[in-house]
Amino acid sequence: MKISNIIVTSLLSASVLFTGLGLEGKAIAKDVFPSMNDKRVKKEVAEMKAEGVTSKQIKELYEMSKKEYSSVSTEEKAEALYKESKKDINQYIKNGVIDEYLPKYNEEREKRSVNAKSKSKSKSKSLGTKGDVLVSYDSGSSVIGLGHAAIVSTEKKQTVESWHKNWSPIKQHGVRKYNNTWRTRKKVYGLWVKKSNNKKYINAAKYAEKQAKEKKPYNMNWLDKKTTKKFYCSQLAWRAWKNQGHDIDNIKFDTVVSPMELVNSNNTKVFYHKK
């Protein structure tokens, strides 16, 4: 790959971060990418500048975010990502390596079988179990484009998420526990981490819970994914798994990690998609 292509790829990686990272707000009816003149966009830009982000960086990120937005701008495009993962999962099953690559597959299948036998009519609002990564690409709820990420707690009825206080559903700044209602939401992916195990899933969830207990603040400097003093949403999920020996960033050499990079990582597979 040429150096110029590497730079563009890295910037595209950064661009997605600008579109979400726990900066989602209340839903706005829109099917187009918001303009830089949007009042909420202006407010967000001012906050980023306060953290040292330059106008040039913001402009570049904004333009490239529009390109990234197009990758899931239609149901067909968004569904294609899920179908690709589903195809890989079926191949793992066929090759007899599903337990090695995705041990959660059989674990969750057994649970579904038990629930079916019990004929339970209860419909859970929660999505996933301990350590699973959840990603929203809802273009109608973020300021600039798309994106939020969470990690499921050791108790599946809760998630651990990092939000900016202006957009937090519970008006809290930084890492906190939230009710897991992700199954009721649209435009959501559920992710499993490849070649992991039950212990690592538990430890990833516990790491995130520890940050919530310490009430780590929200990280507005999205160029610093390596800090553990503060977190943005996808950075928290990434760090929780990085500490287990799994780098679930897509472009691993850069300094940002966006929600959609978690989806596109070669170390995750999409087990759930709701359009």
Image: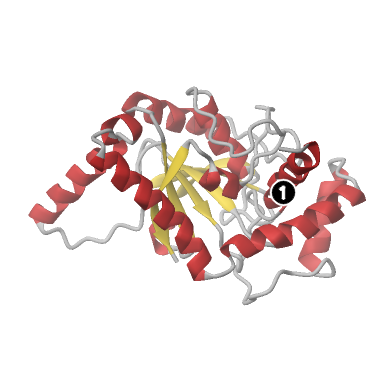
Residue 163, position as x, y percentages in the image? 62, 48
Q: Nearer the viewer, residue 92 or 192?
A: 92
Give the mark count.
1
In the image, taking residue 18 as reference, residue 75 lies left or right, namely left
Depth order, front residue of 210/247: 247
Which SS class for mark 1? Answer: helix
Which part of the image, by quadrant, shows the C terminus? Answer: bottom left
- Residue 165: % across, % down: 67, 50
Asked if residue 106 lies left or right of residue 127, the reply is left
- Place of residue 186 in the rendered image (x, y in percent of width and height, measured from the top left): 46, 65
In the current view of this chain or complex, which residue is farthest to the front?
1
Nearer to the camera, 179 or 228: 228
The residue located at (69%, 38%) in the rendering is 256
Image quadrant in which the N terminus is located: top right
For residue 89, above or below residue 64? above
| Residue in the image at 74% along x and 69% along y | 34
- Mark 1 = which residue? 12
Q: Quadrant of residue 225?
A: top right
Would you place residue 250 above or below residue 181 in this image? above
Amino acid type shown at disc 1 = Leu
The 10 Å Cα crowd at callout 1, few under 14, some 14 to 19, many 20 or more, is many
